[in-house]
Image (cartoon, grey):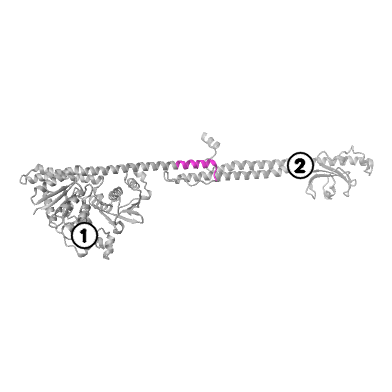
Amino acid sequence: MAIKILLADDHPLTRAGIAEFLKREKSFELVAEADDGKIAWELIQSLKPDVALLDIRMPELDGVSVALKARNMGLTTAIIMLTSYDAQQYVIASLRAGAKGFVLKTVSPKELTNAINTVAKGGLYLDPEVASTIAEDDFMPEQLSAREREVLLLAAKGLSSKEVAKRLFISERTVQTHLASIYDKLGSRNKTEALLLALKYGVVTLEELLEDDD
Amino acid sequence: MLLNLKRFLYGPRSHFLAFLLCALILPSIAVVFVAVAGMVNQERAMEAAVSSYVQDLAESTAYHLGTDMNLNLRNFSWLSDSSLRYPFFSWGPSIPGWIALIDNNGRVIVASPGAMNIAALWRNDLPVGRAVKIEDKQGLQYTLAVYPVRSDSRAGYVIAAVSWTTLLGNLVIVSTIWPVLIVVMAMGSFLAIRLLWTRLILPLKAIATEIDDLRLGRDLPRQFDDYSVKEIESVHRALFRFSQAAIERDNLRNKYVRDIVQAQERERMDMAREIHDGPLQDVTALLQQIHMTLEDDVNSENVRIKRTEKIARSVVRELRALCDELAPPWMDLGLIEALTELAERLSQTYDVQVSADFDEDDVHGLQVDNEITLSLLRIVQEAVSNAVRHGDASEVHVQLRRESENLVLEISDNGTGFDSENTNHETLRLEGHRGLASMTERMALIGGKFRIESSLGNGTRITCVFRV
C-alpha cells in the first residue's frame, strides 16, 4: 500500500519540484499540497496522511507549530520537516514538537525516499548534513555509560551544567568531564550535535528526550 | 625688553593676589615711615625754635628787669606802671605760653595770664639759663627757661614757658591719627583682597575644576553657590548653557546613530527574508530539477550536470551563509535557541570553545522580541570575534540570567584582556575600531546597558543588562 503524503511549502518552485518527484515514486501517494501552515493543518486533520512534509517557515502557521498541534491531538501522521536551513536548533525544535524527521530541501531524491520510508515505519530520520559526525563515515559510537546518558538527556532538556550537577548530586566540573567524554565518544563538537548524533545512533530515543520529568 | 615692560605694566600672571597685596601695602608703609620721619624732624625743629624763643624771652626780660631794678631798688611796685615796657606780663608772649617773675622762694611776683599753675611746675632743681621740657600734673607739656634777674639771684627769676599742647595741639592729633588711618587702610586692603580671593579667585578656580571634571555631553555643572560676584555667576551660567547644549547635541547624535542602526537592522532582516524566500528557494528548486534529471538518466555519466549540481549546492550554502550574516532566520526560534545555535556556530568558525549556558528556571517561558534577539546575537558575535582575534582566547562563556526584572547577558573569555579603565570607546571608534562602540549602540537601541570590564592577563567580561 502506498504511503499517503501531504506536502506543505509556500514556495511554488520547490513545492513543484518535490511534488513531481513524489508523484513519480510508485510507493508514494501525494494526497494534498498546501502553501501555508493553516491549510496544511486543516488538510492533515481531514485527510490523516501517513507522512506530512512541512516547511518550517510558512505564512499563517509555521511547520513547527503544525507538528506540535498534531502531536497534541495525538495524530498518527509522521511529520518530516523540510527546510532550507541547516540550523541544529531547528532540528531540536522540530523533534521537541514531535517531528520524526528533518531533511533539507536540497536533499537527493534517494535520501528523501529513505526519510519517508523510515518515518512511515515509526523510525527517526535526520539529514546527514545536520547530523553528521566529524569522524569517518562508517563511524560507530562507543557505548555511553549510564551516567553519561543521564547527563546528556538532562543537558538536552536545556539544563545548564550547574543545574545538571545539582540534579545528579555531582560537581559542575564532573558534569563538564562527562560532557567532554560524550562529545568524544559520539564524535560531536557540542551539546546539540551530541544529542542529534545520540538520536541518530539510537544511543538515546526520541521518547526519552521528550519525556517530561517534572 | 618689550615683553618685560608689558609684564611689568600688566602685573605678574601667577601670584596675582600677592602682587596686588604688595602694591597696596608697601606704599602705605612707605607713607607711614616718611610721615613719621617728617613729624619727628618737624617736632625737633619746633622744639629748637621754641627752646631758643623761651630762652631769649627769659634772658632779655631778666636783663631789662635787672637794669630797672638797679634804679628802683628792691621794690617791684613800678612794674604795674610799666606795662608798656613789659607788655607780655599783661598779655602773655606772642606765641601760646606765659611769662612770670618769681622771687627766690617760688612766689609769683608778676605773671602773664595763663601762668596760674606755675607753683605746680616750679621745682628747685630746674636748671637755670637753659630751656627744658617738663610736664605738669595734668600731663600738659611745656618748654620753659628760667633766668635769674640779677647774678646774685636774690632778686628772683624770670620764667618763660610755651605750652606744647596749645601750640601743637592739632599737629599732635594729626600725628596720632596718621598711623591709625594707615592701619585702617591696610586692613581695608586685606579685606578687599580677601573678598577678591573668596568671591573671584576661588569661584574661578572652582569653575576651572568643574570644566576639567565635566564629561561634556553627559554632565551638567553643579548647583551654583552665591558667594561669588555676578560676573562669575554669568560665566557659570554660560557654562551651564554650554553643557546643556552639549548634552542635547549628544542626545541628538545618539538618537541619530540609533535610527541609522535601527534602519540598517530592519533592512538587513528584510534582505535576509528576501534572499531566503527568493534566490535560496529558486536555487533549491533548480537543484531538485538537477537531481531528477540525474535520476532519469542513471546510466549516463553526465559530467556537466553533476558539476552543475555541485555549483548549485555551493550557491545554496553561500546564500544560507549570507542570510546568517544579515539576520539569521533561526533567530525566530527564540533567544535561548538562537544564542545556543550561534555559540555552536562560532565554536566551529573560530575553532574555540564557546559555551552557552542557561539556567532553566531563569529562562523558562522567555519571550523576547526579534529586535532584541538580533542585537544580542550581534553583541555575542562581536564579543567572540574580539576575544579570539585580539584576546587570543580559547574559551568563551555566554550566560543569560534573570536579575529581578532584568535579563543579564554575560560574555566572559579567558583571553589576554586589555586595560579597560584607560580605553576610550570614542577614541577607538575614531581609530576605526567600531566593535565596542557598535556593541554599546546596540544595547542603547534596545534600551539596555552595556559594560565591559577587563584588565591585562585576566580576560574580558562583557555585561549587557536589559528589560524584557
Q: Which image quarter: residue A191? A: bottom left
Q: Chain of mark 2?
A: B
Q: Chain of mark 1?
A: A
The amino acid beneath tag 1 is Leu
Please tell me which residue is depicted at 51% across the width and 35% down the height of the picture.
B3
Where is mark 2, residue-wise?
B168
Q: Nearer the viewer, residue B283 or B152?
A: B283
Q: CA distance from mark 2 to mark 1?
A: 123 Å
Q: Secondary structure at mark 1?
A: helix
The crowd level at tag 1 (other Cα within 10 Å; few <14, some 14-19, many 20+) is some
Stretch of the chain drawn in magenta: B227-243
- Tag 2: amino acid: Leu
Q: Alpha-carbon neighbours of circle 2 within 10 Å: few (<14), some, or many (≥20)?
A: some
Viewed as shown, does residue A180 lie left or right of B183?
Answer: left
Question: Is residue A128 at least partly visible in the picture?
Answer: no
Up the image or down, B115 lies above or below A171; here it is above
Residue located beneath label 1 in the image: A209
For the C terminus of chain A, give its image quadrant. bottom left
Residue at x 22% of width, y 63% of height: A150
Tell me, yes or no, whether the highlighted magenta stretch contains residue B253: no
* B13 on left or right of B120: left
